[in-house]
Image (spheres, helix red, strand yellow):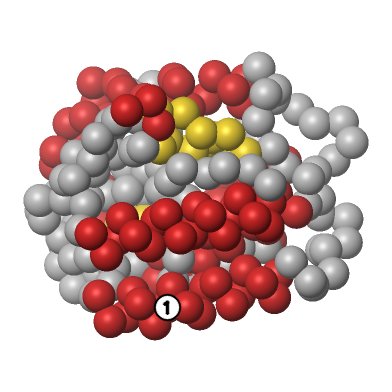
């Protein structure tokens, strides 16, 4: 769970986890918060990694993947600390991994008629990103910026070593890198809450500029050489 100044949101997040995921290990990566995010997380029994400086979402998520890989986990679920994601969907996210049907499963806000209130600019951006991914990957991803994801052990290993750090790189570029290295990506429909507390990762101007940058980065990624010996192994293991 990457978290930056989420102390106000975490009690509700952990209340949800206690009901639906009490048998999971909880890891919070505190991205150099200015509030007491770490203390609140520890009070609920979570393991906390406190980064010495703000790395952004990509850096915080990769730190979580490194921890999961080095500690021998078979799978990991990426879960936001702002209260938007719902732990009741954990079993649905893990099912395709456990049945060896996917290496990454994304919780989508837009599948099967699910409705999610969002700014018009973000809706437009999501559709553009979805179209770009469909053109390049030949696969439709309805919610490419969703940070609600589950990955299996082979992809855990890959992300621990290779994970995009730029804004939206943790979602869009990560999808491209996973797909072009042979990992299978699927989506399932989920419901999400609206953010009530905390700090959003970007403003409209930052979002517009960074969106152009990440589209350029995706284009460049497609022509780069693949990371040697770090693609999907021939003998994959389910979660």
Q: Residue at x 32, y 80 (%)?
A: 206
Q: Residue at x 89, y 36 (%)?
A: 234
- Quadrant into which the C terminus falls: top right
Q: Residue at x 57, y 42 (%)?
A: 140
Residue 185 appears in the rendering: yes
Residue 95 lies, in percent from the top left, at 54, 19
Circle 1 packing at 10 Å, graded few (<14), some (14-19), many (20+), is some
Q: Which secondary structure, mark 1?
A: helix
Residue 16 lies, in percent from the top left, at 21, 29
In the depicted structure, whether residue 34 falls above or below residue 190: below
In the depicted structure, whether residue 96 falls above or below residue 3: above
In the depicted structure, whether residue 13 falls above or below residue 20: below
Give the quadrant of residue 164.
bottom right
Q: Is residue 160 left or right of residue 80?
A: right
Tally of marks = 1
Give the quadrant of residue 79.
top left
Residue 147 lies, in percent from the top left, at 41, 49
Q: Nearer the viewer, residue 55 or 113?
A: 113
Residue 123 lies, in percent from the top left, at 31, 55
Q: Which residue is mark 1?
A: 210
Q: Is residue 219 left or right of residue 90?
A: right
Q: Residue at x 29, y 30 (%)?
A: 114
Residue 70 appears in the rendering: no
């Amino acid at each position: 769970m990457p978290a930056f100044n989420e102390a106000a949101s975490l009690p509700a997040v952990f209340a949800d986890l206690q009901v639906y995921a009490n048998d999971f290990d909880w890891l919070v990566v505190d991205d150099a918060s200015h509030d007491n995010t770490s203390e609140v997380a520890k009070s609920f029994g979570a393991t906390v990694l406190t980064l010495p400086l703000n790395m952004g979402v990509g850096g915080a998520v990769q730190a979580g993947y490194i921890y999961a890989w080095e500690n021998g986990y078979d799978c990991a679920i990426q879960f936001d600390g702002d209260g938007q994601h719902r732990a009741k969907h954990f079993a649905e996210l893990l099912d395709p991994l456990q049945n060896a049907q996917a290496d990454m499963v994304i919780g989508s806000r837009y599948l099967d008629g699910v409705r999610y209130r969002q700014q018009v600019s973000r809706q437009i951006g999501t559709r553009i990103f979805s179209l770009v991914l469909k053109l390049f990957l030949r696969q439709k991803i309805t919610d490419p910026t969703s940070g609600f994801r589950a990955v299996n052990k082979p992809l855990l290993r890959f992300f621990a070593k290779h994970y995009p750090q730029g804004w939206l790189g943790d979602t869009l570029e990560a999808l491209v890198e996973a797909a072009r290295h042979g990992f299978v990506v699927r989506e399932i429909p989920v419901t999400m809450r609206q953010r009530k507390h905390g700090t959003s990762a970007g403003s409209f101007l930052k979002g517009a500029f960074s969106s152009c940058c990440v589209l350029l980065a995706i284009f460049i990624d497609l022509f780069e050489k693949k990371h040697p010996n770090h693609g999907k192994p021939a003998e994959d293991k389910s979660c």
